Image (cartoon, grey):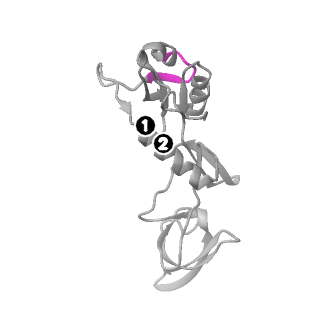
Amino acid sequence: MTHINSDTSSDADHYAWYCVRTKPKREHIAARAMNQIEGVQSFCPRLRYRKATRRGKVWWVEAMFPGYIFGFFSREQNERNIVHTHGVMTILKFGDYMPEIPSSFIADLTQQMQELNEGDDDIMTLEPTVSEGDEVEIAHGAFQGFQGTVIEVMPALERVKLLTEFLGNRHVVETDLLSLLLPNKPVPE
């Protein structure tokens, strides 16, 4: 993301933030291409998280708003260029109405992302957090679907110990932190 300056509008040109629809999984490509157009800025907030796969634990980066990015430009000067940019499908419209995104929303989102990631402008890293006493469900492995209570968190190993009921008895089960579903907490898909 380039430096966001929402105050570059003049009387002749009306610069504003707009929501831009992108091709699937091409948000970052569209944002980069839009930044190359003179007088256009883009913002593509993304989430980075670890996911357990057959290859092991892998870092995934996905758009915070899948299929959409934000663009700051003058409609009169740049609408046609934006629509024909690599990775862009269209600018979000409702009939003839093209809603503007408030600059305060973009500024707040940018500020939160910078605070959480120590300067990484457009990527927010999510870390799974559990604490003792949390009710969780096992999502992968032999105990898939079992529910239990976290009794110990082992952060160095990225594992937890759960107290779960199995065959009429309560058992302590050790499992990978990334194989848990955390109720009432956001989980990226």
Q: Position of residue 31 (x, y in %)?
A: 57, 29
Mark 1 Cα within 10 Å, few/some/many (few <14, many 20+)?
some
Task: Tell me the kind of residue under disc 1.
Answer: Ser
The quadrant of the rendering that contains the N terminus is top right
Q: Are marks 2 and 1 in contact (CB under 8 Å)?
A: yes
Q: Is residue 88 magenta?
A: yes
Q: Is residue 95 above or below residue 57?
A: above
As drawn, the residue found furthest toward the front would be 11
Marks 2 and 1, how far apart at CA: 6 Å
Q: Position of residue 135 (x, y in %)?
A: 45, 74
Determine whether, in the image, residue 17 is placed left or right of residue 42: left
Residue sitting at x 57%, y 56%: 126
Residue 125 seen: no
Q: What segment is highlighted magenta in the picture?
A: 83-90
Residue sitting at x 29%, y 18%: 96
Element under disc 2: helix
Q: Which residue is mark 2?
A: 107
Determine whether, in the image, residue 139 is placed left or right of residue 98: right
Element under disc 1: helix
Determine whether, in the image, residue 67 is placed left or right of residue 174: left
- Depth check, front residue: 120 or 94: 120
Q: Position of residue 145 (x, y in %)?
A: 48, 66
Residue 133 seen: yes
Q: Position of residue 112 (x, y in %)?
A: 52, 51
Q: Which residue is mark 1?
A: 103
Q: Is residue 3 above or below residue 111?
A: above
Q: Is residue 172 above or below residue 60?
A: below
Task: Tell me the kind of residue under disc 2.
Answer: Ala
Q: What numbered label is drawn on residue 47?
A: none
Q: Is residue 62 magenta?
A: no
